[in-house]
Image: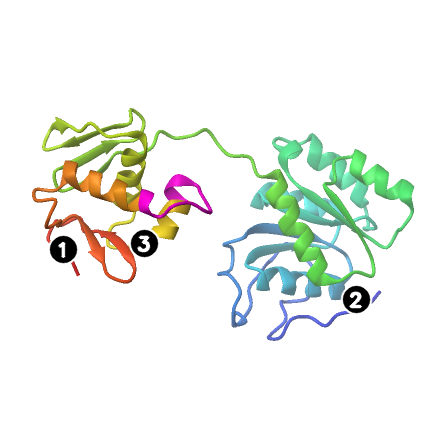
Amino acid sequence: MTIPEPPPAGPTPPGSAGAETARPAAAPAGPAAPGSAGRVLVVDDDPTVAEVVTGYLLRAGFRVDRAADGLEALAVAAATRPDLVVLDLMLPGLDGLEVCRRLRAGAGGTRLPVVMLTARGDESDRILGLELGADDYVTKPFSPRELVLRVQSVLRRSARPGPAAPPARLSAGDLTLDPSARRAFRAGRELALTLREFDLLAFLLRHPGTAFGREELMQRVWGWEFGDLSTVTVHVRRLREKVEDDPAAPALITTVWGVGYRFDPAGKGPVL
């Protein structure tokens, strides 16, 4: 069995079978940090396929564990709790369909994404794999780059946000904002802010010391791709009237000429 693409440049991961975490000796230029994209278990008894798939997943920023048969795959999955499993259908011992069935029956298994990887191209096999819970199905020979894209796509689709945590309070100097209650205070006195004034101030407090253009503020605070930029200018002016000691010489929300505005939490930022 061959794959129509060479492995990525750089050292290849160890080829021995077993539940191992593959680590490149040197990360290729450009990829995300290892593990930042999530953890993937690659299950394939063909060491060439396993090495190539592992190399591409590492390059894409994933942490990768490997198993060469079905029983080993179940043990590694239980021990490492992967974010996704790339699972070959034809395995010694337990085949991929049985492994998928047992993964789905285990604790939390219904939420574990599975991408089936097999030389079988029959529609009935593909349908059976999907019925057992596989989230996608890739037929050999395949493009490793395409497989990585499939893995990334499945993880995006399967992502479930956890319970929303209450937004943390924001503060800078004598300013305090409570995003949950949508209340703002200066030196203990509540400020009468409009909806957009509050959103603008909260955004600036979350990004102290960063200069933003009016176009970016319109997109990120208002959610508008197009609009009259004077809207931002007016809101900044009105907000300064409520949070600055001297709105004519702002020290908190400063103007960065040629760029836009910046929030200086120390309150000592002169107009540039």
Give the side of residue 204 with respect to residue 173, left or right. Answer: right
Q: Position of residue 202 (x, y in %)?
A: 28, 39
Residue matched to label 2: 3
Query: Where is the C terminus found, in terms of image quarters?
Result: bottom left
Q: Residue at x 51, y 55 (%)?
A: 35
Give the side of residue 45 with respect to residue 185, left or right. Answer: right
Q: Residue furthest top?
A: 181
Between 10 and 235, the residue placed more toward the observer is 235
Residue matched to label 1: 269
Between 90 and 151, the residue placed more toward the observer is 151
Element under disc 1:
loop
Check disc 3: other Cα within 10 Å, few if <14, some if 14-19, many if 20+: some
Magenta range is 220-231
Check disc 2: other Cα within 10 Å, few if <14, some if 14-19, many if 20+: some
Q: Position of residue 236 (x, y in %)?
A: 24, 44
Count of labels in the image: 3
Residue type marked 3:
Phe
Question: Of marks 2 and 1, which one's residue comes earlier in the chain?
Answer: 2
Element under disc 2:
loop
- Is residue 31 shown to the viewer in this render? yes
Q: Nearer the viewer, mark 2 or mark 1?
A: 1
Between 181 and 219, the residue placed more toward the observer is 219
Element under disc 3:
strand
Residue type marked 1:
Gly
Discs 2, 3 touching: Cβ within 8 Å: no
Q: Is residue 7 above or below residue 271?
A: below
Question: Of marks 1 and 3, which one's residue comes earlier in the chain?
Answer: 3
Q: Residue at x 57, y 42 (%)?
A: 81
Residue type marked 2:
Ile
